[in-house]
Image: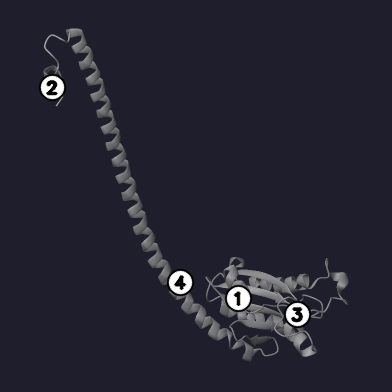
Amino acid sequence: MSRWIMASLVCLLPIGCMSQREYDEMKTQYETQLSGMKDVVAAQERAKSELERQVAYEQATIRAIKGENTALGASNALLTKQIEELNGKISTFGQEHPDIFETMPGGGLSMKGDASFDAGLATLRPKAIAALDALASELRNIPNAMIRIDGHTDNDPIVKTKYKWTTSSNFELAAARALTVLLHLEKQGIAGSQMHMTSFGEHRPRAANDTKANKAMNRRVEIHVGSMPTSTEINGMPDGASDHK
């Protein structure tokens, strides 16, 4: 190719119009340009090879992720089945321990605050301890389940036990009761990594705080079993837990 180009240049120029020095300079310029073009082509080939390597790596990564997703989907399906079976068993706790637990329409258990704790305190009563021990024996069967424990109260201010609390707020009482339940389940072998707790204080009542019966219903601790909920699921799930002052 280079010979053809140089020959063409010579043919296009009038004979005798180009000295040997000018010809040599033109040849040198041409060879320099040609060398530069070769460098560009080589760089493009290297870039192409690197891109092909990256594409191959990304394709391998995608295949690996698809394989992991398939395995994860099977694992989640098994966990979902186990949780459904567990929730079926949990639903019977309201019948087996009616003094402590109430099965909630949307799933989960509600611990009756007045039966589970002394007024204005967060110490479990003996019957509540026995009921939680029975529940823990079922929860241990699914080590991958996530357990959410919600504390709730009515809207009455803490009066008689006010001196026991830092803030004397229903948030604090609800949190203390939910934490007490969580720690007791942990003592019974439920991993702390499986559990989390929330305090709603008086702000998510199950019923209007206008009668003694309704206020007693609002004093509760709720226990929900499933996968780790998102913030949307937390906001949409039934109100959770704590009791009475």
Q: Earlier in the sequence, mark 2 or mark 1?
A: 2
Residue 189 in view (yes/no): no
On the rendered structure, is 81 left or right of 128?
left
Q: Residue at x 58, y 73 (%)?
A: 233
Q: CA distance from mark 2 to mark 3?
A: 100 Å
The mark nearer the N terminus, 1 or 4, is 4
Q: Residues within 10 Å of mark 3 (few under 14, many from 20)?
A: many
**Disc 1 and disc 4: Cα gap in Å?**
22 Å
Q: Which amino acid lies under the numbered mark 4 shown in the image of this protein?
A: Asn
Q: What amino acid is labelled 3 in the image?
A: Asp
Q: Quadrant of residue 34?
A: top left
Q: Secondary structure at mark 3?
A: loop
Residue 238 at x, y percent in the picture: 63, 79
Q: Which residue bears the numbered disc 1?
A: 236
Residue appearing at x 32%, y 44% in the figure: 51
Q: Which residue is mark 4?
A: 76
- Disc 1 marks a residue whose amino acid type is Gly
How far, Cα to Cα, is label 4 from label 3?
A: 34 Å
Q: Is residue 189 above or below residue 128?
A: above
Question: Mark 1 against mark 4, which lies toward the viewer?
Answer: 1
Residues at marks 2 and 3 touching, judged by CB atoms closer than 8 Å: no
Task: Point out residue 75 in the picture as x, y percentages from the top left corner.
Answer: 43, 70
| Between marks 4 and 2 in the image, the one whose residue lies nearer the viewer | 2
Q: CA distance from mark 2 to mark 1?
A: 82 Å
Residue 243 marker: 3
- Which residue is identified by label 2? 8
**On the picture, is 15 further left or further right than 35?**
left
Q: Is residue 134 left or right of residue 125?
A: left
